[in-house]
Image (spheres, rainbow, N blue to C red):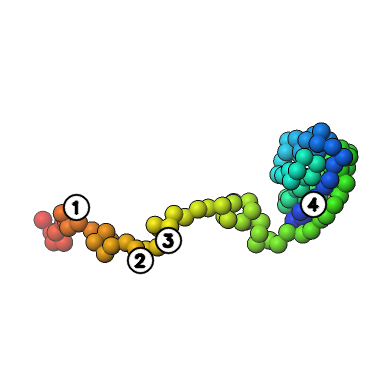
Amino acid sequence: MNMPMAILFDFVDSDNADQAFSLLQELGYDPAMHNPTRLHIHVIGEDLTSALEICQAHGGTLVEQSTIQEELIASTAYGLDAITIPAHLVNEDLVDDEELLPDIGDMSSFSGGRE
């Protein structure tokens, strides 16, 4: 299994960075721009060599690379850190006891015996 990598590139200008960004995106990578000339990619299942060649062909210079911890992959992929939970759902101690009890009139009943 290929090790998940994060790679960061600097480009000579924003046009080259945009071209590399577009091509990487077309090929299924998930590039992100930090500023007009800095781009980073998380290479998880894709080909690392192709990503490097694409960026270098567009004038990119490798600035940094690092491996990604596997537990961060799911969090990044599914955006788990971006899920918001309203405070009224978290603070259950603020709910009145009456709100938790069902209304007896709303319940239907049936007999447990044979008819």
Q: Which is in the foreground here, disc 2 or disc 4?
A: 2
Q: Name the one closer to the observer, 4 or 55.
A: 55
Query: Residue 3 falls in which quadrant of the image?
Result: bottom right
Residue 76 shows up from this direction = yes
Residue kind at label 1, given as amino acid type: Asp
Mark toward the viewer: 3 or 1: 3
Q: Are marks 2 and 1 in contact (CB under 8 Å)?
A: no
Q: Are marks 2 and 4 in contact (CB under 8 Å)?
A: no
Q: Position of residue 72 (x, y in %)?
A: 66, 59
Q: Residue at x 77, y 40 (%)?
A: 36
Label 3 – label 4 distance at C-alpha: 37 Å
Give 96 or 31, whichever is nearer the viewer: 96
Residue at which label 1 appears:
106
SS class of the residue under badge 3?
A: helix
Q: Which residue is mark 3?
A: 90
Query: Label 4: few (<14), some or many (≥20) within 10 Å?
Result: some
Tag shown at residue 64: none
For disc 2, the neighbor class at 10 Å (few under 14, some 14 to 19, many from 20) is: few
Direction bottom: furthest residue: 93
Distance from disc 2 to disc 1, alpha carbons, whole Å, reads 25 Å
| C-alpha gap between disc 2 and disc 4 | 45 Å
Which residue is under mark 2?
A: 93
- Crowding near the residue tagged with mark 1, few <14, some 14–19, many ≥20 C-alpha atoms within 10 Å: few
Q: Earlier in the sequence, mark 2 or mark 4?
A: 4
**If you read the primary sequence from the N terminus, does the residue marked by circle 2 or circle 1 appear first?**
2
At a point 80% along the width and 50% down the height, the residue shown is 8
Q: In this rendered view, identify the residue nearer to me: 32 or 87.
A: 87
Q: Quadrant of the N terminus?
A: bottom right
Of 48 and 34, which appears nearest the observer? 34
Q: Position of residue 9 (x, y in %)?
A: 82, 47
